[in-house]
Image: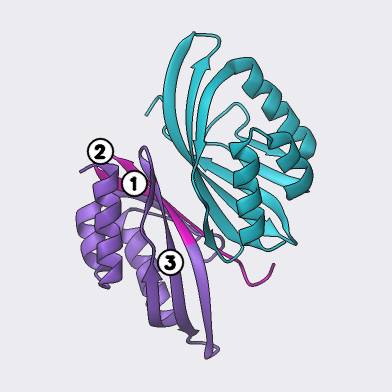
Chain colours: A cyan, B purple
Amino acid sequence: MTTKEVADQLVAYCRNQQEEKAYQELYSSNITSIEMSEPMKEVHGMEGLQKKGQWWEENFEVHGTKVSDPMVADNHFAVTFWMDTTHKPSGQRSQMNEIGVYQVKDGKIWREQFFYDKGEE
Amino acid sequence: MTTKEVADQLVAYCRNQQEEKAYQELYSSNITSIEMSEPMKEVHGMEGLQKKGQWWEENFEVHGTKVSDPMVADNHFAVTFWMDTTHKPSGQRSQMNEIGVYQVKDGKIWREQFFYDKGEE
């Protein structure tokens, strides 16, 4: 798959809440996933992604998401996500946007990095 | 300035080869600028940016650039750049695309990170 095809397919899966399918089909087993801060600032491999997914599910209820079309540059692409969530421990509901930047190698996503506003800044 | 205004102005300056003006008006003196690899993998402040600019000018001749519209997500935005350059030491001409991700704080760009294919991978 070309980077554009991977990007379009990831966006389609995310729009249909099929993240599991995206992980299985589009991600390299050597994936590195990078957030702005701890916990889960940097995880590796499918096990790392699963741990992060579990942490996310334990901490956030998702009411809605919107996913932009991808912006492609050679073997990288960027997507914006809008999310409406409730932080389960505090009960606080909020909306936020983030940018995900993905690196594709041999037709698979092998690095992703997310950019968003951290609360404390 | 809002993040969208900073993004639009940066794009306008880059399209007009007015990077110096962009640094003066849009960048924080606390800027952190991050590349994929050495040299100049991470520089700080205006002095760091100047050093990086000098290194760039010594090593690359730019024949043409194209700059996309920005993709904005709260206090971050992303832009793609297409560049046609000649690497001066080797004389090799090549075209590449990259994604720049910018973080805005108090109306100024205080972090930028670039994503592109490294030759050695």
In the rendered view, tell whether residue A17 sits above or below residue B47: above
Range of residues picked out in magenta: B99-121
* Location of residue B106 (image quadrant): top left
Q: Residue at x 42, y 25 (%)?
A: A95
Q: Residue at x 73, y 35 (%)?
A: A20
Q: Which disc number belongs to residue B106?
A: 2
Q: Which disc number belongs to residue B68?
A: none
Amino acid under disc 2: Asp
Are the two marked residues, 1 and 2, in contact with CB atoms closer than 8 angstroms?
yes
Q: Which residue is mark 1?
A: B110
The location of residue A42, given as percent across then percent down, is 64, 37
The location of residue B94, given as percent across then percent down, is 53, 82
Tell me the chain of label 2: B
Tag 3 and tag 2 share a subunit: yes
| Among the two numbered marks 1 and 3 on one chain, the one whose residue lies closer to the N terminus | 3
Label 1 to label 3, Cα distance in Å?
Answer: 19 Å
Tag 1 and tag 2 share a subunit: yes
